[in-house]
Amino acid sequence: MARFYSVIPAGGIGSRLWPLSRASAPKFLHDLTGSGQTLLQDTVDRLTPLSTSDRILIVTGEAHRSAVMEQCPKLETKNLVLEPSPKDSTAAIALAAAILAKREPDVIIGSFAADHVITNDELFQEAVREAVNVAATGKIVTIGIEPTEPSVGFGYIKAGLRIHEAPTAREVVKFVEKPELSRAKKYVRSGKYLWNAGMFIAPASLLLEVLEDTEPELYKKVMILAEAWGTANQQSVFDNVWPTLKKIAIDYSIAEPAADIDLVAVVPAKFGWHDVGDFAAIAELQADGKPNHLAILGDVKVLSDKSNGILVSETGRLVALIGLEDVIVVDTPDALLVTTKQHAQRVKNLVDSLKTTGHSDVL
Amino acid sequence: MARFYSVIPAGGIGSRLWPLSRASAPKFLHDLTGSGQTLLQDTVDRLTPLSTSDRILIVTGEAHRSAVMEQCPKLETKNLVLEPSPKDSTAAIALAAAILAKREPDVIIGSFAADHVITNDELFQEAVREAVNVAATGKIVTIGIEPTEPSVGFGYIKAGLRIHEAPTAREVVKFVEKPELSRAKKYVRSGKYLWNAGMFIAPASLLLEVLEDTEPELYKKVMILAEAWGTANQQSVFDNVWPTLKKIAIDYSIAEPAADIDLVAVVPAKFGWHDVGDFAAIAELQADGKPNHLAILGDVKVLSDKSNGILVSETGRLVALIGLEDVIVVDTPDALLVTTKQHAQRVKNLVDSLKTTGHSDVL
């Protein structure tokens, strides 16, 4: 574990969580669990026992610099990488890998989203420790989530043979993109598929080697950026190179090609995991199986008469709900959303239409 | 018509319209039709062709003095009667009758609620003119509304024989209190019953005569108050007498007993009438039969994706509604209500529970 470094790519607005999540205050900067901490803070806390707080690196947008610094007071300045604009996950993670490999050539990095919810930190840490051990044998290791339903919202990982000497890890046969429902059902029934939660643990040098093969142009630019990082040239190099980076998810640039050459392993997770992608997911997480539950996030006076679903409030106003089934109410100072869990995914379309109808001020 | 004086009792908070209607800003001070005017202003405008603006008297709570003056700039000070506290309709209307009878012994007053909606002012005025003519023969005349459904929310009037020489007026056989649904259905089927909309047109002296018979104590106090009105003693007499007034609706103190002695007539209304008692009623009035209509009251930016019902906003925030059927959203600076048309009546219970749960600040 001495070689291990945590990397947290903190991007992604979380459009389905509008009007709570905004370009200026994306999902990871919010408390969506009622823990009293933001998802980013929860993520940092979960990783600190694995890599100590001086070995956690965050990659985020320049706009979120001060919010991230404020929420993570132990974060060291050298461990905050600021992106001038969003360039998808390969750029973020490869740049982190290159910067850290320059510092420590044999570093093993683990990349974990800033905006997911994990319900058992000990089991998570156990899984990461196993993944680090497997990664040290020259593998890219992902952590796969046992599917609880045939979701069409996640990619899947087909697990293969057990890996010798590892307690639970298996070879990865292949990654599969978000499937149709019928295919998702087959995956879940087969017992061989896990959800891809986007967690990758690997030697930084191995990630970069694969990238050099699959995306040589992007690899070259990332190495130039890492070289300039922390030097007097940083600003001018970033100004020139960053805008030209190819936007590509790490699944396509590294994970899938590496699986094709048997370089990827998976540790099946025993912990609870939620991507809390929309308000319905948050409501369900909060309800925790309790029927007719009304989840409440925020410091709000509520009078509920036979209502269930979720209420998120940032305004401190009194909110009265009467006879509402599966309702979603999100009450912010400049925008109010009312919908139902059934339509939670349509919030993204609404956000798209806000862009085209001159309401960018509330995005 | 030279004897005619309009009286507008402007009381009643309209609890079912919380959080729009408040003790400090009751129903009649709001624009619930999108006309650009409040219900009180609409009422005054509707009566002005009948009685000229110097013959319209408003009875309202002391707390609403300035709002009423502002909304009704032509209202003469002598025609604004302020109640120290709500004492139901008999006190309000009898006091107005006594004050006006003192000024003009043969005055005929017409009393019309400040918070109802009437959709054809000309037909309303025609009905009132007929009612005044019948009243001049020594009758208490009400205007009855042709029922459009077997409502259990209104009292009913059983109409009898036609009155000679009046174009449409009939004798009133009796008043009936809000019935059960089965009885309401029978009333509507029979074709003999009209809704009691609480409009009364009568010589002031006749109203007071009936009251003297039925409620001699209340009559006596009202006469004392009217005597003191506008004199140096007004304040002290009101301070002493007003709190002791019996709270009783004019239906019980005057209309029903008068009907028993064949003193009441009814003019059937041909105009559209709505008591807009709850948000569902407002939504239906606004929809005017159009299916899937989303009524919008207030200056509000709305993004609606397949939603219908009613949105009332006082905050200027952007409101986004997705996939909501018959929704009611009422967005005010310190309180937000979300419910459905089906539960519109339950808003009253909610207001009651606000009183008992320490939220009187938003009432």
Image (spheres, coloured by chain):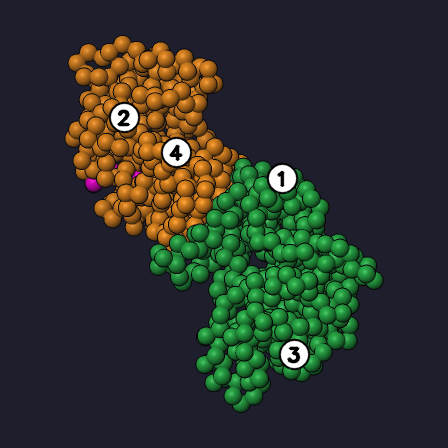
Chain colours: A orange, B green
Question: Mark 1 = which residue?
Answer: B292
Q: CA distance from mark 2 to mark 4?
A: 27 Å
Residue B351 visible to an observer of this rendering:
yes
- Left or right of residue B239, residue B96 in this image: right
Find numbered disc 4 in the image and state the secondary structure of the residue it sits on.
Answer: helix
Tell which tag, 2 or 3, sits nearer the viewer.
3
Amino acid type assigned to the residue bearing label 2 in the image: Ile
Magenta span includes A54: yes
Tell which tag, 3 or 1, sits nearer the viewer.
3
Which chain hosts label 3? B
Q: Residues within 10 Å of mark 3 (few under 14, many from 20)?
A: many
Mark drawn on residue B100: 3
> Does residue B289 lie above or below A97 as drawn?
below
Q: Nearer the viewer, residue A233 or A40?
A: A40
Mark drawn on residue A201: 2
> Does residue A109 lie above or below A323 as drawn?
above
First-in-chain label (2 vs 4): 2
Amino acid type assigned to the residue bearing label 4 in the image: Ala
Magenta span includes B108: no
Q: Nearer the viewer, residue A235 or B40?
A: B40
The reply to whether label 2 and label 1 mark residues of one chain is no
Q: Position of residue B40 (x, y in %)?
A: 62, 65
